[in-house]
Amino acid sequence: MLNFDEELEKFQPSVDVEKVEDVVYNNNLTDVTDIVKELIQDVKGTL
């Protein structure tokens, strides 16, 4: 059986994951929500 407390003590976060988090949080990335908002604004502007 797994001893979760023991496994948690051995846990070490991945450096790669931390690097990716920094890149994602420090960049202004466009997502689907941003695209939909822009499309809605374009449609409202043409009415």
Image (spheres, rainbow, N blue to C red):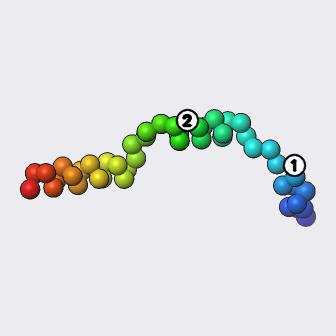
Q: Is residue 39 left or right of residue 33?
A: left
Circle number at residue 47 = none
Q: Are marks 1 and 2 in contact (CB under 8 Å)?
A: no
For the N terminus, the image quarter is bottom right
Mark closer to the observer (1, 2): 2
| Image quarter (top left, top right, bottom left or bottom right) of the C terminus | bottom left
Identify the amino acid type marked 1: Lys
Hey, which residue is sitting farthest front in the picture? Answer: 26
Q: Position of residue 37 (x, y in %)?
A: 29, 53
Q: Is residue 34 left or right of residue 6?
A: left
The residues bearing labels 1 and 2 have C-alpha atoms spaced at a distance of 27 Å
Q: Is residue 39 left or right of residue 17?
A: left
Question: Within the image, what quadrant is residue 15 found in?
Answer: top right
Q: Residue at x 87, y 49 (%)?
A: 10
- Where's residue 42, x and y in %? 18, 49
The residue labelled by disc 2 is 23
The numbered mark, 1 or 2, whose residue comes first in the sequence reads 1
Out of 21 and 4, give the one closest to the viewer.
21
x 34%, y 49%: residue:
34
Q: Residue 3: horizontal and vertical position, in percent? A: 90, 62
- The image shows residue 40 at horizontal and vertical percentages of 23, 55
Q: Secondary structure at mark 2?
A: helix
Q: Mark 2 belongs to which amino acid?
A: Val
The relative height of residue 29 versus residue 3 in the rendered view (above or below) is: above
Instruction: Please rate how many residues cluster around mark 1, counting C-alpha atoms within 10 Å: few if below 14, some from 14 to 19, many from 20.
Output: few
Please tell me whether mark 1 sits on a helix, a strand or a loop: helix
Position of residue 10 in the picture relative to residue 47 (left or right): right
Q: Which residue is mark 1?
A: 10
Quarter occupied by residue 2: bottom right
For the point 15% across and 55% down, which residue is it? 44
At a point 66% along the width and 39% down the height, the residue shown is: 18
Circle 2 crowding by C-alpha within 10 Å: few under 14, some 14–19, many from 20: few
